[in-house]
Image: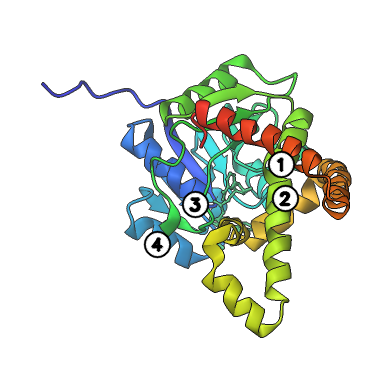
């Protein structure tokens, strides 16, 4: 017997920006029957043509006002530096009662940039799915991206519970575990778990790129010895990551300072031949990896 048709959680979901994250969420909503229809708008027609060709959304247009005007949920899925201008463009066209949410990797500046442009009667639910790949664009999207991954929502003290619960339910329905943090706490945690590792990867790969030609060829040939994992991270979208560092400046600079001090301590241990210090440090860090595997986040 076929399952009875589910009532969609949202009537119309409009995506502003339909790259890796927007496309993956739209595919997951469609697969789960969670949206009555999904629409997309983007800067370039080419992006929308791809999204339509791949069956990611029901309809698409570069006319941002037309796409968002009937939406019950507007998902803003653009680089964090563009969220403010998107909010300004959609603000006057949103219907009363609409929910606006986002997926940006930084939360404090996104809230500060978006909130002033949203009219009364429209609710902002800031969010960040901790799921992604180094690929970009709608072709990179897949419905399973969010399964068994965390999605952090960072509601404001004024956020209505009903809208928050609905967005949380959507993320759970696409397979995520949902957590709530304050925007400030989110940005500090992500600075160490995501932003600093990306900065380190960008640095190592840049250093290798600047090596002499002979050495560089061998770095590529023997990349499986550790370097390869950094190259994957350092292949992440340059615009997205430019915006992350510009928008989470203070938290990133703070953890970078601590990292630099710890690196200097290891540097000194190597110079002085202090094997015990090195071994103790590496034993402690190995336990972290075990914790990640146990938490099924590996
Ligand atoms: P993406 O694949 O590069 O797609 C970006 C989308 O935003 C495209 O539709 C693009 O439009 C549009 N866009 C780019 N710049 C814009 C601008 N200045 N104004 C308006 N629209 C613009 O990016 P993504 O990986 O989906 O990332 C989207 C958001 O998700 C970012 O805020 C990022 O921080 C967050 N996020 C990413 C990951 C990840 O691993 N990638 C994980 C979690 C959260 P056109 O193609 O038409 O130019």
Mark 4 falls on what kind of element?
helix
Identify the mark nearer the N-term, 3 or 1: 3
Count the marks: 4
Of discs 3 and 4, which sits in the foreground? 3
For residue 244, the mark is: 2
- In space, the residues marked 2 and 3 are separated at their CA atoms by 16 Å
For the N terminus, the quadrant is top left
Identify the mark nearer the N-term, 4 or 1: 4
User: Relative to 207, is 29 above or below?
Assistant: above
- In space, the residues marked 3 and 4 are separated at their CA atoms by 12 Å
User: 141 or 64, which lies in front?
Assistant: 141
Is the residue indicated by label 2 positioned so its CB lies within 8 Å of ligand 1?
Answer: yes
* Neighbour tally class for label 1: few under 14, some 14-19, many 20 plus, Cα within 10 Å: many
Identify the mark nearer the N-term, 1 or 2: 1
Mark 1 falls on what kind of element?
loop
Residue indicated by mark 4: 50
Residue 242 spot, x, y in % from top left: 72, 58
Residue indicated by mark 3: 20
* Neighbour tally class for label 4: few under 14, some 14-19, many 20 plus, Cα within 10 Å: some
**Residue drawn at (54%, 52%) of the image:** 17
Q: In the image as oriented, which residue stretches furthest toward the bottom?
A: 213
Give the quarter of the image for residue 274. Answer: top right
**Residue drawn at (72%, 54%) of the image:** 200
Q: In this view, does 69 lie to the left or right of 243?
A: left
Residue 257 spot, x, y in % from top left: 88, 45
């Amino acid at each position: 017997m076929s399952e009875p048709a589910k009532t969609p959680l949202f009537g119309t979901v409009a995506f502003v920006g339909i790259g890796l994250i927007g496309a993956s969420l739209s595919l997951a909503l469609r697969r789960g029957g969670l949206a009555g229809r999904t629409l997309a708008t983007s800067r370039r027609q080419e992006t929308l043509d791809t999204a339509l060709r791949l069956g990611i959304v029901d309809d698409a247009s570069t006319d941002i006002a037309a796409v968002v005007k009937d939406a019950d949920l507007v998902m803003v899925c653009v680089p964090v530096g563009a969220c403010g201008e998107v909010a300004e463009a959609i603000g006057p066209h949103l219907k009363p009662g609409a929910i606006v949410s986002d997926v940006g990797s930084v939360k404090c500046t996104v809230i500060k940039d978006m909130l002033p442009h949203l009219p009364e009667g429209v609710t902002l639910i800031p969010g960040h799915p901790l799921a992604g790949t180094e690929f970009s664009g709608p072709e990179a999207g897949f419905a399973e991206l969010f399964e068994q991954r965390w999605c952090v929502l960072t509601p404001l003290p004024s956020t209505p519970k009903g809208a928050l619960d609905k967005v949380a339910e959507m993320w759970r329905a696409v397979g995520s575990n949902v957590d709530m943090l304050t925007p400030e706490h989110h940005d500090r945690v992500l600075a160490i778990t995501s932003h600093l590792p990306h900065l380190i990867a960008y640095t190592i790969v840049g250093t290798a790129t600047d090596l002499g030609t002979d050495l560089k060829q061998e770095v590529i040939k023997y990349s499986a010895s550790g370097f390869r994992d950094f190259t994957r991270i350092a292949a992440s979208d340059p615009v997205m990551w430019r915006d992350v560092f510009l928008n989470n400046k203070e938290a990133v600079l703070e953890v970078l300072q601590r990292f630099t001090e710890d690196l200097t301590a290891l540097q000194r241990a190597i110079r002085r031949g202090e094997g015990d210090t090195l071994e103790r440090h590496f034993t402690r860090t190995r336990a972290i990896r075990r914790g990640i595997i146990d938490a099924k986040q590996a």
